[in-house]
Image (cartoon, grey):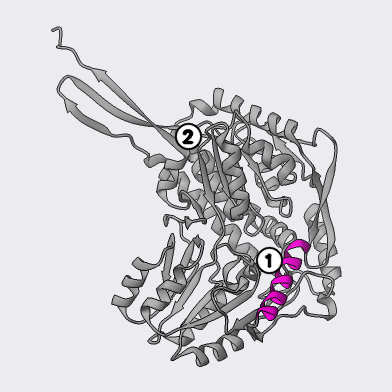
Amino acid sequence: MVDYYDGSIEKNHREAIEQATTDRTFANWIDGEAVTASTDETFETIDPAVSVPITAVPRSGASDVDRAVSAARGAMDGEWGETTAAERSRMIREWVQTLRDHADELALLESLDVGKPLAHAAGEIEKALEFLEYYASVGRAQEGTQVPVSENSHVYTRREPYGVVGAVVPWNFPLVLASWKLGPALAAGNAVVLKPAEDSPLTATRVAQLSKDIFPDGVLNVVHGYGEESGAPLTAHEDVDKLSFTGEDVTGEAVMESAASNITPVTLELGGKSPFVVFPDADLEQAVETVAGGIFYNTGQSCDAPSRVLVHEDVHEEFVDRLVEAAESYEIGDPLVEGTTLGPLASQAQYDKVTGYVETGRDEGATLVAGGDQPGGDLEDGWFVEPTVFDDVDNDMRIAREEIFGPVETINTFSTYEEAIEIANDTEFGLAAGIATTDTDLAHRAAADLEAGSVWVNTYGSTVTGGPFGGYKRSGIGRECGQDALEYYTQTKTVNVELGDPSL
């Protein structure tokens, strides 16, 4: 992607903010139009690289959620409820093409909002569009079944949309994770009320605006605000037929409790503390590159990041040396400048959390072998943390058990296969896991024994269109990204027709 900025980091970002927000209003999007909050209150979204405001967005409440849900219900009762799978596919494809025409604009908004290097943001925008295109295709392939009963009965099934879907997405991959929900929900024929995280409201607003005159009004609605003020009313709303949430596990508990009062079905993609097991026969150069890319990409703010590395004792010393070298090779800097490979954390709260865990690791007796500090100079006003590696970590330490969500890697050692699997599975999470080995038998055996929804062998984090993604244990319920995600946005109806004798 072209690099337009070459001044000081503050100058770069103030110019970019002006470019991204001039003549733009980032209001709620309800029933096909921009809408302010019912209270007329707003809050600021902050650029994490320089800690300055980007723009203001509505601070919505329950009445705004009511309005959005009502608009979605109106769409279901109207034109959208009568569409065919082919018609929905055509609309989604038209929308994707419009979004692709605005890809540079969307990438800049994403970079400013959450601190991603601009090139990474551009790649993620394209990834989001690929997911939307995928569901535009597979949505047309939905089929019912015919159930053989007897000559006198014709029994078949239909897949029907739930109706109004409430979707709540986090701030770490704003548009990608929104696409995981919007793609199958819309392709299946639902209308959506999307609640983006308060730290990353911009791309959600813009893609909804760019759906104007493509989808009928009310099909895609966006309501901004804080979780307890707008998210909670959405998850508890009696006229929402299906909920899909991505975020931390404790909030997932609250979503389930809220949905229970209305018996609303939920899909939850929650946190992780994912192990990466390095067996003694592994290609260490490849393993280190894989681990570093997994934990330091997006400044470690990934639910499936391989944040626990388990290394066989025979290769431990060499692996640590190589990983420290890899960590120190990352270019920390202005996300808008070409060559930056590590941007800031997304918010002050996340910065405080991550730096707190770094101190906890020191206090627990782990050995800090790389990073752990904040860069100075032009970066001191942003929420930057160096790539950090702790060695000599025990699995009962907090840094090995709790989700840090930052560029912090922990290293533990093992001596036997059984010990490796036991340590890997000794966690309340089960979102993902990784394996480094050249032994095919070992790879398949470990993949079967690891308690995780995704297992990557000699690679990591390559979530692809068509590959189901979701977790075991406290990491969630349901799957996204694959064709079977459509099943989580539809319900099955069985039709039984009694056949009489022909009268002719």
Q: Residues within 10 Å of mark 2 (few under 14, many from 20)?
A: some
Kindly indicate the quadrant of the structure image that contains residue 394.
bottom right
Residue 214, picture quadrant = top right
Element at label 2: helix
Residue topped by disc 2: 87
Instruction: First in sequence, mark 2 or 1: give its number.
Output: 2
| Magenta-colored segment: predominant secondary structure | helix
- Residue 435 position, x and y percent, is 42, 75
Q: Quadrant of the C terminus?
A: top left
Residue at (65, 28) in percent of width and height: 71
352 within the magenta span: yes
Nearer to the camera, 437 or 252: 252
Specify the label residue 116 is tagged with.
1
Q: Single out the mark in the foreground, 2 or 1.
A: 1
At label 1, the amino acid type is Lys
Q: CA distance from mark 2 to mark 1?
A: 35 Å
289 lies above or below 191 = below
Looking at the image, residue 255 sits to the left or right of residue 483; the answer is right
Q: Which residues are magenta?
A: 348-364
Whole-percent x and y of residue 70? 65, 27
Residue 356 visible somewhere in the drawing: yes
Q: Is residue 376 left or right of residue 421?
A: right
User: Which numbered dot is residue 421?
Assistant: none
Q: Quadrant of residue 172?
A: bottom right
Quarter of the picture holding the N terminus: bottom right
Contact, mark 2 vs mark 1 (Cβ under 8 Å): no
